[in-house]
Image (spheres, coloured by chain):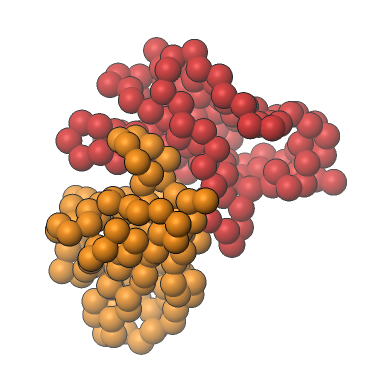
Chain colours: A red, B orange
Amino acid sequence: ILNVEQSPQSLHVQEGDSTNFTCSFPSSNFYALHWYRWETAKSPEALFVMTLNGDEKKKGRISATLNTKEGYSYLYIKGSQPEDSATYLCAYYIIQGAQKLVFGQGTRLTINP
Amino acid sequence: GAVVSQHPSRVICKSGTSVKIECRSLDFQATTMFWYRQFPKQSLMLMATSNEGSKATYEQGVEKDKFLINHASLTLSTLTVTSAHPEDSSFYICSAEGQGQGETQYFGPGTRLLVL
């Protein structure tokens, strides 16, 4: 059974502080890792698709890194704002057999004003 | 761009009835769409992969006669929960894949189903 783990499950951060959280995935047969942001009552929004070991991608105050050899990715948010409150999902893309995304449980981030 | 709509957003039905959920890609063509289910405090779990013009591929443990999927056009896939029972109550969400293997999936906002 393929396991994608995210930690922590939930996180409370003071507005203006920076934060980060982790996605762990199998290091063998890596193809791609996706990050999504999911605000309540909205559609999950794609943040990054990461494919290369050592990749670092950035979108505004949010960035992500990838280590495929050890099987983890970090998502960083710099200078958290209330609008960053959401659940952040990572998903590991499988290409053996059926091609599909396997999701972690998410990290629920709450920014306290 | 890359907007996916899903209807209805919420549905309450009686046990034994069937419910149809629509997933539409509004501004792009999607040869592949996905249907997920989420139980409380759990991950999004893939139910089936839907390819335009062909039969859906169901994940292990998902009853294909229970969850009927139709993908008749490049912009529409439907999921019908047949003879729904209270245990089918859940959150169902669809996505459509962009061009290319492993590319971003664009999600609808989901449908909350409650079966009484």
Question: Between A90 and B102, which is closer to the camera in this rendering?
Answer: B102
Residue at 29% over, 77% down = B84
- The x, y position of residue B75, in whole percent, is 34, 61
Image mark count: 0
Q: Where is residue A110 in the image (x, y as percent from the top left)?
A: 71, 46
Residue A56 seen from this side: yes
Q: In this view, does A22 lie to the left or right of A19?
A: left
Q: Left of B32 or right of it: where is A7?
A: right
Instruction: Please state if A14 lies on the left or on the right of A30 as rendered.
Output: right
The quarter of the displayed image where residue A3 is located: top left
Looking at the picture, does residue A54 appear above or below residue B74? above
Q: Going 41% across and 23% down the picture, which residue do you hit?
A: A51
Left or right placement of residue A36 versus residue B37 in this view: right
**Residue A84 in the image, given as x and y percentages of width and height:** 70, 43
User: To which quarter of the image does residue A57 belong?
Assistant: top right
> The C terminus of chain B lies in which quarter of the figure?
bottom left
Q: Is residue B47 visible?
A: no
The residue lying toward the viewer, choosing from B114 and A77, is A77
Q: Which residue sits at x=54%, y=47%?
A: A45
Q: Where is residue A61 in the image (x, y as percent from the top left)?
A: 71, 31
The residue positioned 26% from the left and 63% from the top of the image is B73
Classify A87 as above or below B81. Answer: above
| Residue A50 higher or lower than B33, as above or below | above
The answer to which image quadrant residue B89 occupies is: bottom left
